[in-house]
Amino acid sequence: MSETLYNSRILRLAADTAGAARLNDPQGTATKVSPVCGSKVTADIDLDTAGRVARHGQEVRACALGQAAATLVGAEIVGKDLAALDGARAELADWLAGRRDAPPAWPGLDVFAPARPHRARHPSILLAFDAAIAAARVAAPVTA
């Protein structure tokens, strides 16, 4: 492994979660906890009429990797629909697990390259996506 797991890029991103805040009266809320390390992310989502994320808030109680991932999710989530979130999460999970060589298309996720060999860290990295996706599913209107 050529790069330190908790490198300066990850630590800078982790520090950026300090400004994250929950939404008042969101359409959807979900909390996800990593069973491996106890990291916890609560995501709040409001969707527009087309089903795209209009507003996103979060509370992050996680390790530096989980905090960094939450920062990257929060920076790019507005305007994405549930399919895009599911796709980004799948790309990240596959890349972390070594099932794909190319980093995910979601901006910045390549920062987690040093974490790929550390499988126990993957759930924390995926946590912000898991919480946002679950909150978006709550917010999504029920269709017949």
Image: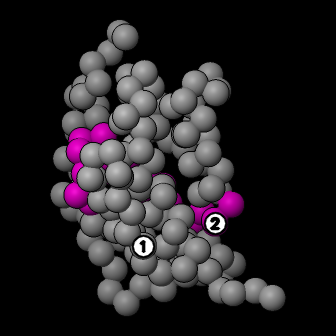
Q: Is residue 51 magenta?
A: no
Is residue 129 left or right of 59 when viewed as pictured? Answer: right
Quadrant that contains the N terminus: top left
In contact (CB < 8 Å): disc 1 and disc 2:
no
What is the three-letter code of the residue carrying label 1?
Ala
Which of the 4 image quadrants contains residue 7?
Answer: top left
Identified at 64% across, 27% down, the residue is: 99
Is residue 32 visible in the rendered image? The answer is: yes
Label 1: which residue? Answer: 30
Kindly report the distance in space between the C-alpha atoms of the residues bearing marks 1 and 2. 16 Å
Identified at 60% across, 35% down, the residue is: 94
Front tag of 1 and 2: 1
Q: Which residues are magenta?
A: 60-83
Q: Is residue 9 above or below residue 38?
A: above
Is residue 126 left or right of 7 when viewed as pictured? Answer: right
Label 2: which residue? Answer: 81
Identified at 58% across, 74% down, the residue is: 137
| Residue positioned most to the top | 2
Q: Is residue 133 above or below residue 65?
A: below
- x and y percentages locating residue 49 in the rendered image: 65, 84
Q: Nearer the viewer, residue 95 or 26?
A: 95
Q: Nearer the viewer, residue 97 or 86?
A: 97
Identified at 27% across, 19% down, the residue is: 4
The tag earlier along the polypeptide, 1 or 2, is 1
